[in-house]
RNA sequence: GUGACCGUAGCUCAGGUGGUUAGAGCGCCAGGUUGUGGCCCUGGAGGUCGGGGGUUCAAGUCCCCUCGGUCACCCCA
């Protein structure tokens, strides 16, 4: 396909009837519908924010030294403003919360979102330059019940889609004071062993030492065995909140495993952190991740902390997981009725009839190019039409239509006047 | 940013050691039924073999460059 344009690297068109579920619009509509339904059921309200945000918002919230900010942002300048295509949605939502003084609204705010995000990484399975996230946030309380509620609504989305072969890992990261202290202790522990670390981990030691905790290298795992534990450095509040969360999850029968090595990549996380994994989506095993981010609001300019907890989930990864778990994924929708017309005048009449039947609430299709009856019947069959309405001069003279049941093959003659009612009766 | 692998019809893929007009299945279109689908049969359309350069009498096949894709690393949804 040269000479014409194509989608840019790491982006894709979603098409009706596509072979791969990942790019089939029917699948996306189904998934999105379930997300809206579950969120609504849990009392979360939808928020939509612009795809374009000020670069500073992202840089200050996520952290200067994270990979996202240092190398994965799509940014551009225009005039004296720097814009960024949002790489995630938590910061924009906190921005909106602050901008619109949502703390003035009654009670805690339960918000959910769904939409595209952008990161300038090299694409691979489960990772794309334009990808789609959904997520939920509870803003305005540090009650551990909020942490549990966010996890509960997240799990309900997957459960409703019947994706149950997942694994939930949780941890607590401590608060604004204890996290840096732990970081120091870890660096102190590992520094004598610098020689034994991989090149990558050596870099992480200075940049983002907590990330070494989830290394896959066996030799490094050994080194970490007698490393200081995050939990030992955690403050009393965090620990109590963590215990409360675990109790709530148990009572809700949401199974989880504690993972003291679990850390999150973004700077604004404190206390609760969690991740949901699935084995069937390639190297990018995380379906969703989240946690508490009480530090985010001050980081983007709020005069005081705003307690908040939430999760973000990848829709592409969700669809890949459903595919690998052999879950039902919708195909193209069938038609109630297909109009078949022969000749000029009949073609015009059939078109008017088509609109009438649609107005009566039926899903009706029709070919517009002039084609043989056989060809039109083939199209009706491919559209999985249940009934076919045939109109030609012969029928028009008698003011009737021939109706064919595509399941049984039976045909009948029906007066045009009562056509819609007759079809509705047949379809029930 | 780094690495590996792949790039032949709309799709999935065949095309030993380079050798006449590049193939199949599915899909698409038409016909077999001058007004009837699914199955079957027949025929047809559709390819600058990703692009450029080179080696050669001769390149889809060998070499170089380039573009695109896939997967992986880093990191993350």
Image (cartoon, grey):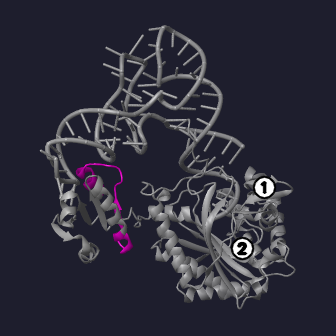
Callouts 2 and 1 in the same chain: yes
Question: Residue at coordinates 50% horizontally, 64% vertically from top-left?
Answer: A28
**A200 and B20: which is toward the camera:** B20
Question: Residue at coordinates 85% horizontally, 82% vertically from top-left?
Answer: A304
- Look at mark 2 in the image and give the residue it sits on: A93
Specify the label residue A70 is tagged with: 1
Question: Residue at coordinates 57% horizontally, 44% vertically from top-left?
Answer: A6
Q: Is residue B34 left or right of residue A250?
A: left
Q: In the rendered image of this protein, does residue A149 appear above or below residue A202? A: below
Residue A353: horizontal and vertical position, in percent?
Answer: 32, 66
Element type at mark 1: helix
Element type at mark 2: helix
Badge count:
2
Tell me the quarter of the picture where residue A259 sits. bottom right
Please give the range of residues in magenta.
A356-379
Q: Identify the mark nearer the N-term, 2 or 1.
A: 1
Q: Is residue A97 one of those drawn in magenta?
A: no
Say whether residue A48 is visible: yes
Q: Pointer 1 indicates a residue of which chain?
A: A
Q: In the rendered image of this protein, does residue A14 appear above or below residue A265? A: above
- Residue projecting furthest to the bottom: A106
Say whether residue A295 is visible: no
Quadrant containing the C terminus of chain A in the rendered view: bottom left
Q: Pointer 2 indicates a residue of which chain?
A: A
Tell me the quarter of the picture where residue A227 sits. bottom right
Circle 2 Cα neighbour tier, 10 Å, few/some/many (<14 / 14–19 / ≥20):
many
Circle 1 Cα neighbour tier, 10 Å, few/some/many (<14 / 14–19 / ≥20):
few
Specify the label residue A108 is tagged with: none
- Residue projecting furthest to the front: A397
Q: Is residue A374 one of those drawn in magenta?
A: yes
Residue A243: horizontal and vertical position, in percent?
Answer: 67, 86
Question: Residue at coordinates 48% horizontally, 55% vertically from top-left?
Answer: A15
């Amino acid at each position: 396909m040269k000479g014409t344009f194509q989608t840019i690297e790491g982006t894709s068109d979603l098409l009706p009837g596509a072979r791969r579920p990942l790019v089939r619009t029917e699948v996306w509509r189904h998934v999105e519908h379930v997300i809206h339904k579950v969120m609504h059921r849990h009392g979360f309200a939808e928020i939509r924010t612009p795809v374009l945000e000020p670069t500073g918002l992202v840089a200050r919230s996520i952290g200067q030294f994270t990979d996202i900010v240092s190398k994965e942002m799509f940014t551009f300048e225009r005039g004296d403003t720097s814009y960024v295509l949002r790489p995630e949605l938590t910061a924009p939502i906190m921005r909106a919360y602050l901008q619109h003084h949502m703390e003035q609204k009654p009670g805690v705010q339960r918000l959910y979102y769904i939409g595209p995000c952008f990161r300038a990484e090299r694409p691979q399975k489960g990772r794309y330059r334009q990808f789609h996230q959904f997520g939920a946030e509870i803003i305005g309380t540090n009650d551990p019940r909020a942490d549990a509620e966010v996890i509960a609504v997240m799990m309900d989305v997957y459960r409703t889609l019947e994706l149950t072969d997942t694994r939930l890992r949780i941890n607590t990261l401590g608060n604004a004071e204890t996290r840096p202290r732990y970081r120091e202790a870890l660096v102190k522990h590992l520094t004598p062993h610098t020689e034994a670390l991989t090149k990558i981990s050596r870099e992480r030691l200075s940049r983002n030492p907590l990330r070494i905790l989830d290394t896959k290298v066996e030799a490094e795992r050994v080194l970490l065995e007698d490393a200081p534990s995050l939990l030992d450095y955690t403050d009393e509040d965090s620990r109590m909140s963590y215990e409360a969360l675990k109790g709530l999850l148990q009572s809700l029968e949401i199974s989880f495993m504690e993972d003291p090595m679990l850390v999150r990549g973004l700077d604004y996380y404190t206390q609760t952190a969690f991740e949901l994994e699935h084995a069937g989506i390639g190297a990018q095993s995380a379906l969703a991740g989240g946690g508490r981010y009480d530090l985010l609001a001050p980081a983007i300019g709020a005069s005081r902390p705003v307690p908040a907890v939430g999760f973000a989930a990848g829709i592409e990864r969700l669809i890949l997981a459903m595919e690998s778990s052999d879950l039902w994924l919708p195909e193209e929708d069938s038609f109630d009725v297909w109009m078949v017309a022969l000749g000029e005048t009949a073609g015009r009449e059939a078109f008017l009839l088509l609109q009438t039947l649609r107005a009566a609430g039926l899903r009706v299709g029709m070919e517009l190019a002039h084609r043989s009856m056989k060809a039109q019947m083939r199209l009706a069959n491919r559209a999985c039409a249940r009934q076919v309405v045939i109109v030609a001069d012969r029928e028009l003279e008698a003011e009737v239509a021939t109706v064919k049941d595509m399941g049984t093959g039976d045909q009948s003659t029906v007066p045009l006047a009562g056509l819609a009612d007759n079809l509705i009766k047949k379809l029930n």
